[in-house]
Amino acid sequence: MNYIYPDYYKDFNCIKGECRHNCCIGWEIDIDDNTLEFYKTVSGDFGEKLKNNIAFKEQPHFILGEKERCPFLNKKNLCDIIIELGEEHLCEICADHPRFRNQLPDRTEIGLGLSCEAAARLIIGKKTPMILIGNIETTDTIILLRDKILKVLQDRNKNVLERLKEMLYICNTDFDFDSIYIFFDILLSLERLDEEWTKTLTTLKLGFKNADFDGFDCFMEMRQTEYEQLAVYMLYRHFSNAFDEQSIIEKARFTAFTVLLIRSIGAVIWSKTQSFNFDDMIEIIRLFSAEIEYSDENLYILLDELGI
């Protein structure tokens, strides 16, 4: 199998108990069949704890406890399954997160998701252009188009907004950057995972018209790589699944929309506080990814709206 991955992929390390937004809290964790069969064979007190904390009906999953914590996340925010059984006996979702895989005819593209704080820091904080590792030669027209756009998004002779416009032009579409406010109510209407995202969107909606975008853009002039890496990630993760002209338009607009939304939130925060640091950027991107990328329903609704 031909595996393709970003050059930062192998640098990822879970920060375990230091993570501020533990992926073992607030997520329903499904258990794959092979792991479930192994868990049924575990004996002793821990085996009993496993059986008592798994819902076996329909799609088997761990039964979340108080504050929606995985029952195997201990007080030190470490995984008791790893401690008791070893990392090799995690279920597939736990072992893979925050990794994703896109299966294509001639390759499997893998990467890291931005809903993970450590992955987001690694990706967004990268100062050099992302490079894809593996046998990237292909005749797939979608991938060839995407790779052409990647070069555009990494052209540091232009600012990021100019690069986004060129990307949209290549995909035979456009997007009115000044009209992004019409999507605020749509975002607020979507399924919610974390109420911090509601607060962020509400702050954005209330402060958007008075935000000093020119001042904020000057403030962010030396941090253009953060926008670049966000755009490149979005294109790499989502564009390969495009299959016709309409889906190409949706994915291109989604990439542009994501950068513009994060820029807008940053501008509102900076206009109020005169501060918007790297930690602020990572938290907003992490929230967006968790709320949109990791909810198929939310993602499809947004893509449909962007495709109109």
Image (tube, rainbow, N blue to C red):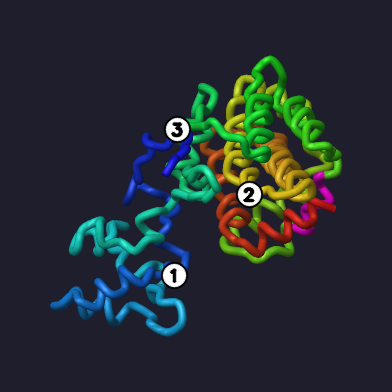
For the view shown, which residue lies furthest in the bottom direction?
Answer: 57
How crowded pointer 1 is (Cα within 10 Å; few <14, some 14-19, many 20+) is rated as few
SS assignment at label 2: helix
For the view shown, which residue lies furthest in the top direction?
Answer: 157
126 displayed left or right of 90: right
Residue 133, can we see it? Answer: yes
- For the record, the magenta segment spans 180-186
Number of numbered markers? 3
SS assignment at label 3: loop
Q: Residue at x 80, y 51 (%)?
A: 307
Q: 211 or 283: which is nearer to us?
A: 283
Q: CA distance from mark 1 to mark 2?
A: 32 Å
Pointer 3 residue: 134
Badge 1 or badge 2: first in the primary sequence: 1
Pointer 1 residue: 68
Residue 12, horizontal then vertical, whole percent? 38, 39
How crowded pointer 3 is (Cα within 10 Å; few <14, some 14-19, many 20+) is rated as some
Q: Residue at x 82, y 39 (%)?
A: 210
Q: Amino acid at mark 3?
A: Gly
Residue 167, horizontal then vertical, whole percent? 74, 32
Badge 2 or badge 3: first in the primary sequence: 3
Q: Residue at x 29, y 82 (%)?
A: 52
Note whether 198 is above or below 67 in the view shown: above
Badge 1 or badge 3: first in the primary sequence: 1
Residue 65, can we see it? Answer: no
Residue 129, horizontal then vertical, whole percent? 54, 24
Q: 245 or 75: which is nearer to us?
A: 245
SS assignment at label 1: helix
Note whether 251 is above or below 172 in the view shown: below
Residue 116, horizontal then vertical, whole percent? 47, 48
Give the quarter of the image for residue 169: top right
